[in-house]
């Protein structure tokens, strides 16, 4: 009997990280790792904004991609955008679903959940006040 070569299959057991309202920094780091591990081309689309440029020639809609490169770019763009939309909580999904490309979607999510320096400072102040005002009951 001839020995048959063994083939190994790698199965990705990573779960898609879902965004939690106050954990944007951690989520963005996990999302980057998830995308680079599962399909690096998707992360490249998000970072570089490699959306396929297909001009619209009529009112009927955009011209479909013709070259293999355009088709691949379109596929990666749709997959990247869909992956990001799947990672957004349901209550916020309606705010983001009309965004046209993955790069813009990533930037809008960052602006909405990442906040700016002032909002982070305010959040720290609120948490500090809550900590200082915390009292345990006698039974605890």
Image: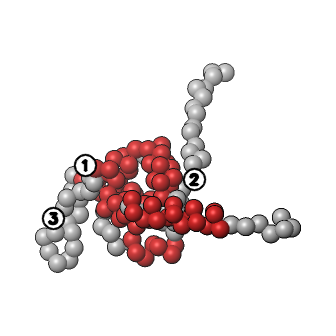
Nearer the observer, 22 or 125 = 125
Report the Cα–Cα distance between label 1 and label 3.
16 Å
> Where does label 3 land, which residue?
55
Which mark is on residue 15? 2
Viewer-nearest of discs 1 and 3: 3
For label 2, the SS is loop
Q: Is residue 71 visible?
A: no
Nearer the observer, 64 or 76 = 76
Q: Residue at x 20, y 77 (%)?
A: 60
For label 1, the SS is helix
Q: Residue at x 46, y 65 (%)?
A: 122
- Residue 116 image point, x, y percent: 38, 61
Q: Residue at x 65, y 68 (%)?
A: 133
- Residue 38 image point, x, y percent: 48, 46
On screen, 5 above or below 44? above
- Residue 52 image point, x, y percent: 24, 56
Q: Residue at x 50, y 50 (%)?
A: 30
Q: Residue furthest front?
A: 132
Report the Cα–Cα distance between label 2 and label 1.
29 Å
On screen, 111 above or below 4? below
- Residue 34 image point, x, y percent: 49, 48
For label 3, the SS is loop
> Where does label 1 land, which residue?
69
């Amino acid at each position: 009997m001839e020995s048959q070569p063994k083939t190994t299959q790698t199965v990705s057991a990573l779960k898609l990280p879902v965004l939690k309202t106050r954990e944007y920094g951690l989520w963005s780091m996990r999302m980057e790792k998830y995308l680079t591990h599962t399909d690096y081309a998707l992360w490249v689309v998000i970072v570089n904004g490699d959306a396929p440029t297909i001009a619209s020639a009529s009112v009927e809609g955009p011209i479909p991609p013709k070259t293999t490169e355009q088709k691949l770019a379109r596929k990666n763009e749709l997959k990247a955008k869909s992956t990001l939309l799947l990672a957004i909580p349901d209550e916020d999904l309606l705010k983001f679903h009309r965004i046209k490309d993955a790069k813009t979607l990533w930037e809008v999510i960052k602006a909405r959940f990442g906040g700016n320096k002032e909002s982070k400072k305010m959040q720290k102040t609120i948490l500090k006040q809550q900590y200082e005002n915390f009292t345990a009951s006698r039974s605890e």
